[in-house]
Image (cartoon, rainbow, N blue to C red):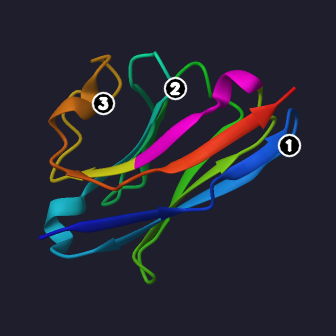
Amino acid sequence: QVQLVESGGGSVQAGGSLKLSCAVSGEPYSTNCMGWIRQAPGKEREGVAAIYTGGDIKYYADSVKGRFTISQDNAKNMVYLQMNSLQPEDTAMYYCAAAYRCAGVGYTENWYAGMPYWGKGTQVTISS
C-alpha cells in the first residue's frame, strides 16, 4: 500500500514562491512515476508536473514551464514542487499522485487519471 502526504501549501502574493512536499511511503516499485496535479474551484484537474523517479525524467505542463520545478529525494522518500513567480491563476488544491509507470505523460492531457495513489491535497492561494 502506498501513502502520500502533501504539505507546504499556503497563501502568498503574486510573484511569490512556495515549495510543496510529498512524503511517500509504501511499496517503492509502485511509485516509479510521481506527479503533481492541481484543481481549481469549478475547473478540470490539470497535471502540472511529473517525474520518472528511476531516470529523473521530468514533464511540465505549458502553463507552469519555466516557473515550477519537480524534484525528488530518494533517500528521504520525498517529492517536491518548487513554485516560483506564482500568479492568481495558480490558485488550486495541489495533489501528489503516484503510479508504477508514467503512462501517457507528455502526450495525453489527462495522464494522471490512471494513477492509483493520491494524497489528500494541499491548498495554494495566490492573491493579486
Q: Amino acid at mark 1?
A: Gly
Q: Is residue 89 magenta?
A: yes
Q: Earlier in the sequence, mark 3 or mark 2?
A: 2
Question: In the picture, which quadrant includes the N terminus?
Answer: bottom left
Q: Residues within 10 Å of mark 3 (few under 14, many from 20)?
A: many
The one of 2 and 13 positioned closer to us in this rendering: 13
Amino acid at pointer 2:
Ala
Q: Say which residue label 3 marks.
A: 105
- Name the residue located 20 percent from the left edge and 72 percent from the top edge: 28
Name the mark on residue 16: 1
Q: Position of residue 8 (x, y in %)?
A: 62, 61
| Secondary-structure class at tag 3 | loop
Counting from the top left corner in percent of width and height, residue 50 is at 41, 42
| Residue 40 marker | 2
Magenta residue span:
88-95
Q: Quadrant of residue 14?
A: top right
Do labels 3 and 2 touch, CB within 8 Å? no
What is the number of the mark on residue 91?
Answer: none
Residue 122 rendering spot, x and y as whole percentages: 52, 52
Q: How far separated are the C-alphas under marks 3 and 2? A: 21 Å
Residue at the left extreme? 1
- Against 27, is 82 above or below? above
Quarter of the C terminus within the rendering: top right
- Whole-angstrom CA distance, mark 3 to mark 1, is 28 Å
Residue 63 is situated, as x and y percent measured from the top left of the image, at 60, 20
Q: Residue at x 39, y 76 (%)?
A: 77
Q: CA distance from mark 2 to mark 1?
A: 19 Å
Point 26% across, 27% down: residue: 111
